[in-house]
Image (cartoon, rainbow, N blue to C red):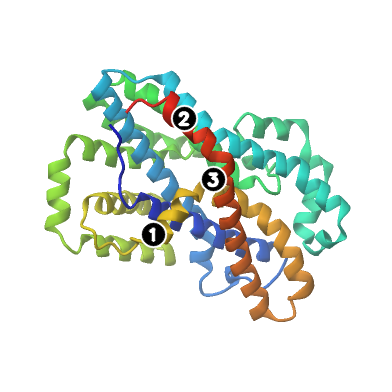
Amino acid sequence: MQIFFKGLNELRAIAALAVVAHHIELFKFRDSQASMFSTFFEFFISHVGKNGVYLFFVLSGFLITYLLLQEKKNNETISIKKFYLRRVFRIWPLYYLIIAISFILIPYLASNFEIFTEIPYYYNKITNPDNYSLSTLSYYLLFMPNVALYLKQGVVGSSQAWSVGVEEQFYILWPLLLLFFSKWRLPIVFLGIIIAMPVFAYFVAPIFSFEYMSIGALGAFGLFYFPSIIEKFIKKNKYLYLIIILAILVLMSVQFTPYYIQSIVLSVLFIGLILTTVIGDESRIFKSRTLSFLGRISYGIYMYHPFIMFLMFPLANRYFQSNIIIFNLFLYILIPGISILVSHLSYKYFELPFIKIKDTKFKTL
């Protein structure tokens, strides 16, 4: 039995491209260049990257929870070993490749090619040996980049990996919860995590973000156990899909509450978008072969694009900075374009062999 939800790849693509746009503007801002961070669009641009990550988190919580519930129903248990090995073969190869690029290749290039002095903020971070300590390396090797970033030990080329660390930590916990808690206790557990996470963040450290996955998990629980009710509600309210999209755009553009509260409301809307996408009819705004393709390689786009920015920004700063139109066209065409090309090649020739092992040796559905 293979479960495939239509439309999720398109949402992954949008999330990944949102992160890329945010990081391009952040790169410019940190080197005191004209950035949309200082315009009317400041709130949208300064939060669109995190909102994209939160969409990834909600998607992960939804999909992983639904698949584990289906496995538990089919097999009357969950194979913890196979679950972990599936995550290892899907996540670890590219993750560790990016860590190698960040700790070895990027410092080598910055130290040996003068053009990288054109990005002073990042050049200073790269050439400062204190940023490459054994403790920093250990955090990244042990899948704790979120802890490293919280301790201000982010490394150029892999700071985006904080969210991968959060997801890996989530994957350690989640199959155990779904295996050992009964059906009716699960939504209580999910709600408990949603409540506990901000308390933990306030008194200890804001490093886990499991509340966003738990929101996705609640959506999966509802769809798994009450599909007819959810389907009837969604199909009865024919404008619900458009209302959710409009509400998402408004909350991403204008701040009404403290950002954390707004991000939680957005995540509830994200699970609404996911459910209306997988249940609704075929006339979806984001239905696209191109977006579906980009969603399939979105992990690569997310992980490779900081390295591509590191390569492209020095060229843009040296040769095109005098013309702001050409400068931005160069960045917004080449960075996403090269990131997509590299991610496609990586998926086809590097990641896919590991994915095939995952799907053949450790399949449970």
Q: What crowding class fits label 2: few (fewer than 14 Cα within 10 Å), some (14-19), or many (20 or more)?
A: some
Identify the mark at residue 289; answer none if there is no mark. Answer: 1
Q: Which of the marked residues, 1 or 3, is nearer the chain's N terminus?
A: 1
Task: Identify whether 184 is placed above or below 25.
Answer: above
Q: What crowding class fits label 1: few (fewer than 14 Cα within 10 Å), some (14-19), or many (20 or more)?
A: few
Residue 267 seen in the figure: yes
Q: Relative to the observer, which residue lies in front, 213 or 9?
A: 9
Q: Are marks 3 and 2 in contact (CB under 8 Å)?
A: no
Residue ID for mark 2: 358
Q: Residue at x 27, y 19 (%)?
A: 75
Q: Secondary structure at mark 3?
A: helix
Q: CA distance from mark 1 to mark 2?
A: 25 Å
Please identify the quadrant where the C terminus is shown.
top left
Residue 147 seen in the figure: no
Q: CA distance from mark 3 to mark 2?
A: 15 Å
Q: Residue at x 65, y 71 (%)?
A: 330
Task: Identify whether 56 is placed above or below 74.
Answer: below
Left or right, residue 185 beside residue 82: left
Instruction: Give the residue type at disc 3.
Output: Lys
Instruction: Give the residue type at disc 1.
Output: Arg
Q: What crowding class fits label 3: few (fewer than 14 Cα within 10 Å), some (14-19), or many (20 or more)?
A: few
Q: Secondary structure at mark 2?
A: helix
Residue ID for mark 3: 348
Q: CA distance from mark 1 to mark 3?
A: 17 Å
Disc 1 versus disc 3: nearer the observer: 3
Identify the mark at residue 106; answer none if there is no mark. Answer: none
Q: Relative to the observer, which residue lies in front, 223 or 84?
A: 84
Left or right, residue 56 beside residue 140: left
Instruction: Give the residue type at disc 2.
Output: Lys
